[in-house]
Image (cartoon, helix red, strand yellow):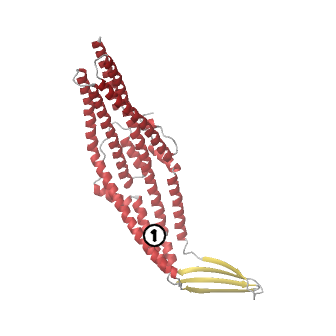
Amino acid sequence: MAQQQRGWTRKRWLSWLCSVLCLCAVTPASALDLVADFQKAMQHDPHYRAAQAEKGANLTLAEQARLSYLPEASLNTQRLQTDVAARRTMTVTQPLFNAEKLALLKMQDPRADFAEASLMTQQADLAQRLFKAATGIILAVENQSLNQARLSALTQQTERAKRLYAMGQGTVTDQRDLEVKLAQARAQHLLLTSQVETAAKQYAAVVGERPKVAEFVLAKQHTALKLLPLDDHVAQSLAHHPAVKASKMSEKMAELEVSRAKGATLPTLSAAYINSSSGNLTNVSTALVVNMPFQVGTWMGHELAQQNLLKAVANRRETEEKIRVDVEKAWNQVSSGVEILKAQSEAIDAARLSVEANTRSFQGGIRSSVDVINAIQTVYQVTSDYVSIAVGQAESYLTLLASAQASPMDAIRQAQAYLLAPAAPR
């Protein structure tokens, strides 16, 4: 009877083992479309919407700069105590030489370019935040699935240990050890369930609607990525990254602001048309007007503009250095990640073979059930590490794409194709 019970238990264990290994190996198809969600995020995300409004404000300032050298008109009405009628004076002035307004006029193109580059910077940042939220869901969902398989294994082994102990064929130590591991797995399951919910809410905060977490499925395999040499990647990033462009335009505007502040201290020359009337008398005249400003505040404004220029230069250098470091870090991670994932995949295969070997040794009475569970725990750990490495690889790949000439949508599309399982054909 005991031998029949032992044989039935071993068959049940092997059946469970096959189901666990299949669970770790099978990847369902995903219908997720991060590009479509990115378009939704551009309509919902408040930070990006504020960036769009800021672009409109910068374009308005650029248009204002374009109009700075146009004629100016003023209408003045006054009546002195000695006047028998009100005096009305209309003056039209056309600047002929005005260094301050000329510098302001030159700001039109840099300010427009700054507006576009700033919005593209925020668009790239939105793509990074969206992809980061997506990978957060992937990590939580994959770890939850792995832990569920581990929980099932521990539950069956704990029940088996109790039966063996009741029949006098097991030890209370095995039973207690399994109960501890089972309690830990249950606590981990509650934690991972909470992490899935939190990750889904973070994704919804970016997109504006709750995602279907079942669609966030990791691909079975991750192939090698084609990369340019590091120096070429860095050169492309420094030439095309929108944050670098924005910092350069900010520096250019700071230079023109110094010229504008200096021009405010210089004399101006204007042509004026003056039409003055009082009662039945009208006086029309034209003149060249020279204005010599003498204000202490204008000199202080020039000093302030010079300090702002130094700040803009430092900010541009800081931005370029940050982009360089980020690109080098991402490039190194992506280039080495291929071999790391390959080694991690081999570790997963070895861990699964270890489960099988420990199971057969357990059937032969050489290993205990705890040894088998430790082998299952190793499968869980190395598979979880593989998921984390693959996610980090995809995030670095997105950084490289967004730093070069790829648009945020193209970058997201390529990063999704690398990380996630393809959608099922309809």
Looking at this rendering, what residue extends furthest in the right direction? 84
Q: Quadrant of the N terminus?
A: top left
Which residue appears at 32% of the width and 43% of the height? 389
Q: Which residue is mark 1?
A: 253
Toward the viewer: 173 or 383? 173
Compared with 102, 385 (above or below) is above
Seen in the image, is 81 located left or right of residue 131?
Answer: right
Residue 269 point in image, percent of width and height: 54, 84
At 33% from the left edge and 19% from the top edge, which residue is drawn? 12
Query: Can residue 114 be seen?
Result: yes
Considering only vertical position in the picture, is 264 above or below 253? below
Does 202 appear above or below 152? below
Q: Secondary structure at mark 1?
A: helix
User: Would you identify the image quadrant in which residue 337 lies?
Assistant: top left
Q: Residues within 10 Å of mark 1 (few under 14, many from 20)?
A: many
In the image, taking residue 145 as reference, residue 4 lies left or right, namely: left
Q: Quadrant of residue 10?
A: top left
**x, y (%) of residue 173?**
29, 26
What amino acid is labelled 1 in the image? Met
Residue closest to the far front: 172
